[in-house]
Amino acid sequence: MIALADWNALSPAEAAQELVVCCAAPAWALALAEERPFPTTSEMLDSSDRVLTALDWVDLQPALAAHPRIGERIRRQGAEADWSRREQAGAQDTDDATARALIEANEAYEERFGHVFLIFATGKSAGEMLAAARERLRNDEITEQAAVRAELAKITRLRLERLLT
């Protein structure tokens, strides 16, 4: 965790490195670091949303690759892994049928779209996440990319708030 003023004072490379735990897209981290200084966390969060919206789809791929599958046991260590465990808590304590259905939905989603199913999981049950995956499987590529960007922005925003407290 770091204070906003301390983060603003870092070199661009150091500032970007601090952000990668929130969103593993280097282009996003570098762009946000270049926009410093931010007078308030709120302004930084708004800039983060804007940068994520403006990035090319290919620039978001590292962030998608860094996210674990919904319902999958997270074995990595560190702040990002701890946050993922907490965010996905609703998918961990579920019945066997729902757990299997989540695995199947993840596989179908990855086959269709070529990347992990991304959802802002905080506060959602396994059933809610499963229903969302099934619904989003009906999306066309462009609609789903917009949905992924929106979910990634919510996840990143929450993580930035955690980082800067």
Image (cartoon, rainbow, N blue to C red):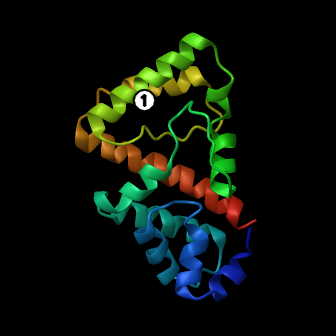
Q: Is residue 91 above or below residue 113?
A: above
Q: Residue at x 52, y 60 (%)?
A: 23
Q: Residue at x 69, y 23 (%)?
A: 93
Q: Which residue is mark 1?
A: 106
Residue furthest to the top: 97
Q: Position of residue 98 (x, y in %)?
A: 55, 15
Left or right: 36, with 107 as reference point: right
State whether residue 52 appears in this view: yes
Position of 158 with respect to 5 (left or right) is left
Q: Nearer the viewer, residue 47 or 11?
A: 11
Image x and y of residue 27, in percent: 40, 70
Q: Residue at x 29, y 62 (%)?
A: 56
Residue at the outermost front position: 75
Q: Quadrant of residue 60?
A: bottom left
Count of marks, rendered view: 1
Please identify the quadrant where the N terminus is shown.
Answer: bottom right
- Tag 1's secondary structure? helix
Quadrant in which the C terminus is drawn: bottom right
Q: Within 10 Å of the Cα at label 1, are there few (<14), some (14-19), or many (20+) other Cα atoms?
A: many
Eyeballing the image, is 5 above or below 121? below
In the image, residue 118 sits, relative to residue 133, either above or below, namely below
Determine whether, in the image, residue 127 is placed left or right of residue 62: right
Instruction: Report the front residue among 136 and 63.
Output: 63
At a point 49% along the width and 23% down the height, the residue shown is: 102
Hey, what amino acid is under mark 1? Asn
The image position of residue 130, as x and y in percent, is 49, 23
Q: Is residue 43 visible?
A: no
